[in-house]
Image: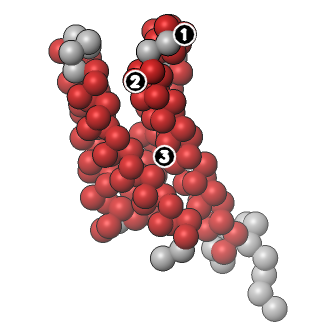
Amino acid sequence: MSALTRAIQGVILFCTLFGVAFLYEVQPILPSSVFYTVAFGWFLFVVDSALTFVRPRVSYYLGLVLAVLALGATVSQPAHYSLIASGDVTATLTIVIGSVSEVALIVLVLAHLISGRRTDPWSVSAKPEG
C-alpha cells in the first residue's frame, strides 16, 4: 500500500473519529432534525471508514463526495463565521480542524485519482511503453 493510500485512509479515519467530538459539541445547540441529518452524515463516514479496508477505491470516491459536501456545508453557513469572530476557541478549533481535514481528503483523493490515471494503460494520457 502506497503512502498516498495510507494517508487517505488515515484522513478518512480521522474525520470519522473527529466526528464523534463534533456531534458531542453540536448536539445541544442544533435542532433535532438538523442534528439527525448531521449524525447521518457522520454515519456515512463510519461506512466509509469500514470501506477503506475492504473496498478502498469505492471508499475514496465516497470520501471525496462526503468531504465536498461537508466542506460546502461549513463554508456556506454565515453562523460559522460569526462563531469564529466571537472568539469561541472550541468552536473555532472544531471548524478549522474539520475544514482542514476535509480539504486534505479532497486533495489526497484527487492526487490519488490523477496518479492512478497516469499509470492506467487504458487512459488517454498514459504514455505508451517501449
Which image quadrant: the C terminus? bottom right
Q: Amino acid at mark 3?
A: Leu
Q: Position of residue 13 (x, y in %)?
A: 36, 53
Query: Mark 2 vs mark 3: which is more N-terminal?
Result: 3
Q: Position of residue 31 (x, y in %)?
A: 22, 11
Side of 113 relative to 43 (left or right): right
Is disc 2 placed on a helix, strand or loop? helix
Q: Closer to the observer: label 2 or label 3? A: 2
Residue for badge 1? 85
Q: CA distance from mark 2 to mark 3?
A: 26 Å
In the rendered image, the vertical position of residue 10 relative to residue 62, given as above or below: below
Residue for badge 3? 64
Q: Residue at x 54, y 74 (%)?
A: 2
Is disc 1 placed on a helix, strand or loop? helix
Q: CA distance from mark 2 to mark 1?
A: 12 Å
Q: Closer to the observer: label 3 or label 1? A: 1
Q: Residue at x 21, y 15 (%)?
A: 28
Mark yes or no: residue 77 visible.
no
Q: Residue at x 42, y 60 (%)?
A: 9
Q: Amino acid at mark 2?
A: Thr
